[in-house]
Amino acid sequence: MNNAPSPEPQRQHNLDGLENTQQSQPTSASNSASSDKSRYAFTIKEPKQDTFYFKTDDNGHPIKLGDGTYGIVYEVHNANNRPYAAKLLYQDQETDRSYERFHSEMSSAQLILDKIDEQGGDRNEFAGVIETEGGTDEFHESPAYNALREFLEPLQISNYVLVMPKYEKTLKQLLEEERADFYTLSDFNPTVNEYFPSGTPIISKDELESQIHANVESLTPNTKDDERKDIMQTLRDAMYPVTGYEILRCMNFDERINNMQPYIYAVAEGLKTLHQVRLLHLDLKPANIFVRKRGTRIDTVIGDLGFLDEVNRQFSDFSYKPYLDKTNQPSLPLGTRHYRSPEQKDFFDVADVEVRVGPDIELIIKDPKFNDTIIEKFDVVSFSQYKLEFEIADVRSRKFGENHSYFIRLEKPETEIANIIQPEKRTQVYFFKRQRHRTDLFGFGALIFELLTCGKSPERFYDSIRSYDTTSQDVETIMELYKQISNFQSTEPGIVQIFAPFKLHEASSTYAPPEIVSLILKCMLYKASNRFYNS
């Protein structure tokens, strides 16, 4: 008798795990609750008037699709029962941030279309970015709010509601939520290791139960039935549904990259749309990527457009300043932990400077701690004593022994304000980063990194490689170090640690293809030459 376990069934895994939401032609509402649905109605007025209705569960509560820092999203439908998503913004008692975000996000799609028109482009080029249907700033006056007041009031919902197309999931949900169609067994269970010595498969629940039965029968031919049943039950108890991350983790790199491509290409298309019309997203992450399946196609768009900013915004515009305003709140997003670019994480610096005043204003810094600064041309200087801000025209450094002196030139504005600045031997100034295209490029590289490494932190990876991200380095020379590690031509501990996330899994000796690692570095590195952002 052959006592080897039965071969594990082979399955083609894929990340999407989405239901097919191909929309049929809209039909008139005809369900039993249609006569009651007007209780849950609210009307948007811009850009055109339309009425939507909250979908509720058996308890009369709205069906939640997701939430975030600024609001909570519920499922709604129009008069023809076509599904949409309604984002209810939270109240902000201290500032008018909810008002600003409402108008910014509601107008984002129209702003993109207007800018395409201004440039003489084709509106069909609008791709990869979610289109907001419209919104209302009088939600509290609606029948829906009155009907749901007891449920919504504790959530401190504001008057502002945005309506947009319904997408099935965010990419974050797709990666983190458990999948009902795939199961596996816990590797930490000794019984699992005994009866699945070659590893645990990721297959359907029924297939896994059949595999458990086959393996136990094969490996326990002389065991009593009761003992065999106990073993099978122990293995069944170790079964659990896998997440999208685990689906990716079970793939080789070719399969993993093939599964990533539809999402990555669509996000690239969305960034292209934004950047072509000189807009920036500034908070790219899986939670802001929305996906749905339409037939055989996966639709992926960039959403959460409440912080879109213009590339050519003047530094003097109050809303553009990335430093603290009088409410002690950042007036621009500073990213999300694990996805923050260097200019979001280190968004300000402070130094004592010598001030020289001539045709221009020159600041001289001799503090060695300023050597690792990322302050550069077009960033902003704020004088503590004058409460004035200037845009940086140029940054130069000169080495004296082991230390550098920095010479920062500010163009004097043609106003009386410039005459206020006086020569000083020593005064304190603040430097503030401006977020630009490289912020979105970092986010794009971070997204690829996260998918490729099955959930490792892009920000931690950048922190580990940052010592190599200098003006004296080149992406290609850093890639040579990666190739040495991946080809086992070097065992230098520091480099091994930096590139460890690119192993297929922790115990593997297989590393990611250098082409995709190079793509990530060209997006995420800040100072090394031959990256995508070089100006």
Image (cartoon, rainbow, N blue to C red):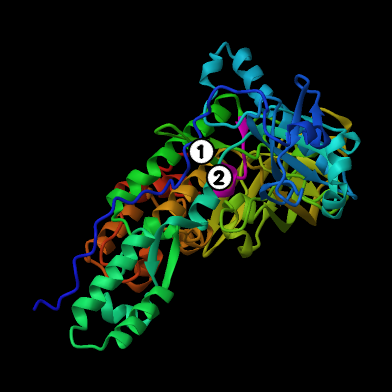
Image coordinates for residue 525, horizontal then vertical, percent: 47, 50
Q: Residue at x 77, y 45 (%)?
A: 331
Q: CA distance from mark 1 to mark 2?
A: 7 Å
The residue tagged 2 is 169
Helix, strand or loop at label 1? It is strand
Q: Is residue 252 above or below residue 22?
A: below
Q: Which residue is mark 1?
A: 292
Choose between 99 and 203: the one closer to the eye: 203
Residue at the outermost left position: 1
Element carrying mark 2:
strand
The amino acid type, in three-letter code, at marker 1 is Arg
Q: Position of residue 230 (x, y in %)?
A: 36, 84
Is residue 314 in view? no
Q: Residue at x 32, y 53 (%)?
A: 479
Residue 309 lies left or right of residue 89; in this view the side is left
Compared across the picture, whether 195 is left or right of 468 comes to: left
Say if residue 90 shows up in the picture: yes
In the picture, measured across the screen, residue 512 lies left or right of residue 395, that is left
In this view, which residue lies farthest toward the top?
120
* Residue stretch rendered in magenta on the structure: 279-289
The numbered disc on residue 320 is none
In this view, 239 is above or below 79: below
Q: Within the magenta stretch, is there residue 72?
A: no
Taking the spot 56% from the left edge, 46% from the top edge, the residue there is: 170
Which one is in front, 164 or 127?
A: 164
Q: Which of the 4 image quadrants contains residue 107?
A: top right
Q: Is residue 285 magenta?
A: yes
